[in-house]
Amino acid sequence: MRRVHLPLALAVLLATFAFALPAQAAAPVICEKYGSTAIQNGRYIVQNNVWGADTAQCIDVNQNGGFTITQAAHNNATNGAPAAYPSIFAGCHYANCTTGSGLPMRADASGFRNLRSAVSMSYPNSGTWNAAYDLWFDPTPRTDGQNTGAELMIWLNRRGSIQPIGSQVGTVNLAGATWQVWFGNIGWNVISYVRTTPATSLDFAVDTFYADVVARGYGQRSWYLTSVQAGFEPWVGGAGLAVGSFSVTTSGGQDPQPGGSCQAAATVQGQWDGGYVVQPVTVTNRGSSPISSWRVTFTLPAGQAITGSWGAQLSTSGQTVTATNLPYNGSLAPGGSTSFGFQASRPGGSTAVPSGYTCS
């Protein structure tokens, strides 16, 4: 997120710089405070966005749909604003716009309820940060400047003594998980959903959360969604935080994962010293034709091993795990889904969990 207004001349300069980047350029390392680059023929933009500090930060962009923070010298007070929001987005952010997203989109439009996003992330065991979506709504379909309607944040994970803006106003079960709901106003409404158990991925319909925002009186159906962003807010450190994959799709649009119609999203159900359970890993057919089988691959962090599984056949090669369907759950109609789960061991004291679930 960006909490400050840029001087007009600087905003124009940044926008000019962003559009001057060739869409097919090699994936760069970005260290400029507000540096950004378009990937996948302009479908998404990755931005460094060091809006809350003057400390160094660099991100290594992955043209397949993500980035890794390679350097972060942040040391912000945890009772104040974060240092940055390095992120990948679809839509428009301060006149920097992607192509083909359909955003801005009014929240009562027929296509809004078909709008989905998915992300996979990985986290280091250091620093103070959150891993969060940031979705921006405005009363007008503006493509530049600060949105003034609502900022919808979805926290998948956090580390350290940080909390969202405002105060907790409730809890809710959405997208297969339980979330704390926080609300505050800083010139616009900020509604934050904080997952009660950490996750490394999320696949959701945008309206799943926005419908709850509207029901609580914090947003309106007449407002426009201007951008869907996913990334990290580091207060202290942040090196090693990574987005492995990201997608924003609508019904009839491109597949969430290039080259396929299958998508996987995982939830960490329980953790303890020396192990954890991931359940469910949801496999969904996002295509327009039935599929008869599926395969999900992911990477175990070093030193970990699979100790049990259900709902799929798992095999391991090095740290790469491949899960394939069982005879009863391989066929999925368009929009259909199934799930599996597994248990893994890890070195005592480690909090690492797998990321980058890929389905084919």
Image (cartoon, helix red, strand yellow):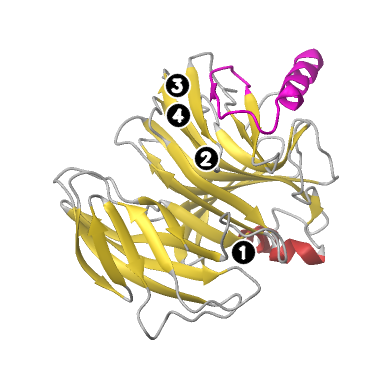
Contact? badges 4 and 1 (CB < 8 Å): no
- The residue that disc 2 covers is 66
From which residue to which does the magenta span run? 8-35
Work out whether residue 163 can be spotted.
no
Identify the mark at residue 69; answer none if there is no mark.
4
Distance between the alpha carbons at the discs numbered 2 and 3: 25 Å
The answer to whether residue 197 is above or below residue 26 is below
Nearer-the-camera pick, 355 or 359: 359
How far across and how far down the image is residue 223, in percent? 80, 52
Q: Nearer the viewer, mark 1 or mark 3?
A: 1
Q: Residues within 10 Å of mark 4 (few under 14, many from 20)?
A: many
Lower position in the chain sequence, tag 1 or tag 3: 3
281 relative to 342 in the view: left or right? right
- The residue that disc 1 covers is 208
Contact? badges 3 and 4 (CB < 8 Å): no
Distance between the alpha carbons at the discs numbered 4 and 1: 29 Å
Q: Nearer the viewer, mark 4 or mark 2?
A: 2
